[in-house]
Image: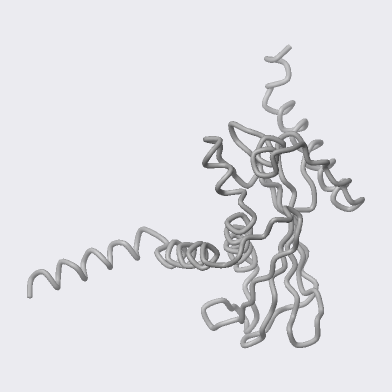
Amino acid sequence: MWWVLWVLAILLALFCIVDVWYFLRAAAVILRAWFQPPVWDITAEQVLTGRVTPHDIDMCHMNNARYLRECDFARFSLYMRNGVFKAVRALKASMVVGATTIRYRRALCIGEGYELRSRIVTWDDKAFFLEQRFVSTKDGLVCAVMYCKQSVIRGSPDKILQHLCKRKVECPEFPEDLQHWVNFISASSQALRAESGLEEKNK
């Protein structure tokens, strides 16, 4: 009987201090992608389906933070199926989110189904740039669209792609709207560096 109480106490502590559902969901997404067919085209769009549940909502529509959380899981699936995760491990590199921006066009309401369409749009010498769209299955409307800058640490997108494709892969051109956002990131970084005095220290 005491061991049951100990197990319950440990589970309660875990749920209090760790986002257990996040890690369980991430593991499930990665495991599912592991058994799905690989996607050889690095820029191919991949689709995950979802539905707005009571756990996702505030005021009867999907909470704004939930969109970013769902995008996390979609990227895990994307990188598993197109081989990027495997290449990153082989090269002993890692990836972190360097920046995101999201535009909400129409609320996804409770019970509404959607497709989360993710794709790598382009890349530079330090990061991949992805687009992720929430498309309602009710009427096909793009309810939200997000851009993500996925920075590569101890490596580069070119090295990852050469590892995967065994050749040099030409970088697609930056769409105009994405280029505006990248310019904003660069300007923001320069302003923050100047504000903290880093530019003067580097002179």
Residue 113: % across, % down: 66, 83
Q: Residue furthest left?
A: 1
- State the residue in front, 20 or 118: 118
How far from the left and from the top, in percent, is residue 161?
A: 69, 42
Seen from this angle, which residue lies furthest right?
176
Position in image of residue 11 (x %, y %): 27, 67
Q: Quadrant of residue 136?
A: bottom right
Q: Taking 116 as reference, is 11 left or right?
A: left
Q: Residue at x 43, y 68 (%)?
A: 21
Q: State the quadrant of the N terminus.
A: bottom left
Badge count: 0
| Residue at screen point 14% across, 71% down | 5
Q: Residue at x 75, y 49 (%)?
A: 129
Residue at x 84% of width, y 50% of height: 178
Q: Residue furthest top?
A: 203
- Which quarter of the figure is the C terminus placed in? top right
Image quadrant of residue 156? top right
Q: Position of residue 69 (x, y in %)?
A: 58, 63
